[in-house]
Amino acid sequence: MGDFEPSPNSPKKFVIVGIVLLGLVIVAMFVLESTPSLAPAPKQSPTPDTPVSQPIAFPPESDQGIAGIRSLCGNCHSLPDPASFPKRKWPGLVDTWYQYARQAGMKPEQIVDINMVKGYFHRRAPETLDFSPLIDNPLSSGPLEFEKHTYNALGVPPLPRITNVRWVRLKSENGLDCIVSDMQHGKLFLWEFDQPDVGLVPIADVAHPSHVEVSDLNQDGHPDLIVADLGTFFPDDSENGRILWLRYDAANMRYEPEVLARKLGRVADVQSADFDGDGDLDLIVAVFGWRSVGEVLYYENISRDVQQPRFRAPRQIDKRNGAIHVPIADINQDGRLDFVVLLSQQHEEVIAYLNEGSARFSAHTIYKAEDPAYGSTGIQLADIDGDNDLDVVYTNGDLMDSGMLKPYHSVQWLENKGSYPFTHHHLAPMPGVHRAVAGDFDQDGDQDIIAVSFVPDTSFFEREQWPLNSILWIEQTGLREFTPHALETILCDHTTADLADYDRDGDLDLVTGTITWAGISGIRTPPRKTHSITIWENRGPRTAVSESISTKSLDKSEQQPRDSCR
């Protein structure tokens, strides 16, 4: 979107919101917390639904008409790449754009004829998207062996909508616990591994928890939780989002909820740090919003008593919608904490906000995709190349702009070389990739990446007939050299993931959370069993010839909770 900055006091007017006004559906819905990728496939047509487009009569192009198209799109973002979709999709997409523009009070027909726009994209688009390089490059499961533990939080329908899983140190004396955010049941669960007989324990009612961070906000020595409450499951422009503080009451051994902010757009992420150097914790908030709301906010803690946090009215850092993540770190190593913003939708940008002192921030673009349909889904900060600075692990895999698989969706590495933008690397294609997390999975001294995919069960395509890789281990085999391995295929339900040594055996294990579309009106789901949480226990180097992964069912309805934890 570049320099498009609507007034904070009036709705943003999207002239043509690009392909991604539908694309925000997934990210907005689950902003929770974003490659040879396809597993062996039969030799068939490389897309699940590839009818050859029929000839359509569009008006001839003119220099004036093309200038109008560029002007129309350029009010909000760069001109979409016609190669992002096959020919048959473009007429319907343009119809959707014009519909949204009219709803926003615009008159796009006065700028350029709708059939001229349809013809522009239709002529330049391919008949089909090319997946053949992915299909012809099947992946092995790699040199590590895993034991898969599945667990259903409640053991009964409805099926889960797990938006965030986090390994944390809260109550377990000798190990980690797991915080589980479940939008289906409107709860936060704590999984205490030192008490396996207890299982998942609800610790707070939160209607739409999208992300949770551990933060001792009142500095009393007890870890609290800060929760981003999305406010609504489906995307809209309502202002039901909230920021919650779950203060740990040590005397009663429970979490007491307190609302820090309400009447926000859909809150995707909240992080805490002392940005102004006054000894207390401030907040950075990603308000994803939807079409006419959304922003990045800074809440300054102005309390005179650190145990009673109080915040000044928020300062708007970025006026644009679509913010997904706002991780905090000292990016430029000057001793002051900065943060990084991922903007999705038509913006598709990763921005470093450097702290110039006293919580005054300057914006520096780390990466900006040229295509507004790029489909950003997530970022994580990590030193991938071991040069003692922070890089960015970045994913783009949003599928809800059309329901179509995209061959350009992938896991990417934005390498920090001390200047902006960062150096961009494609690591592995992965249609539908939703999150990626970095860690030394194989204990060889360098950072690997685990990526998970989320491909909704919609009627747009039959994903079971298309063997997508749902979990990739991207092994760093040498400095800046990466080899992807498929740990799982088909079950592309994973919206969140985290790494930690949960079993205390010295290596990293993986936990993933699941969202299904079962029970959502108008959406058809195939009949299969889906679990809320899956732990992939790292068993070390593979010893057997077989590449099969050992699996244990830990469904609460089938086994005792004790088995689910060990």
Image: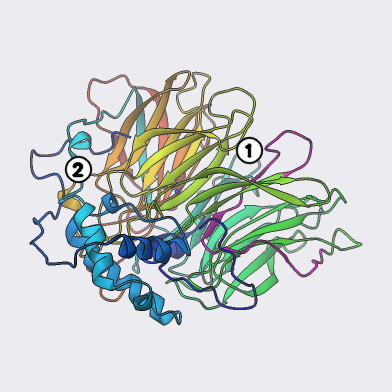
Q: Residue furthest front?
A: 63
Residue type for callout 1: Asn
Q: Where is residue 438 in the image (x, y as percent from the top left)?
A: 50, 35
Q: Where is residue 176 in the image (x, y as percent from the top left)?
A: 58, 42
Magenta stretch, residue numbers: 309-337
Q: Mark 2 points at which residue?
A: 130
Instruction: Work out whether 304 lies above or below 506.
Output: below
* Residue occupying the point 20% across, 47% down: 129
Q: Which numbered marker is on residue 458?
A: none
Instruction: Work out whether 536 lies above or below 386.
Output: below
Q: Is residue 283 visible?
A: yes
* Residue occupying the point 38% across, 73% down: 111
Question: What predominant SS class does the magenta segment belong to?
Answer: loop
SS assignment at label 1: loop
Q: Is residue 435 visible?
A: no
Q: Quadrant of residue 337?
A: top right
* Residue occupying the point 28% across, 49% down: 406
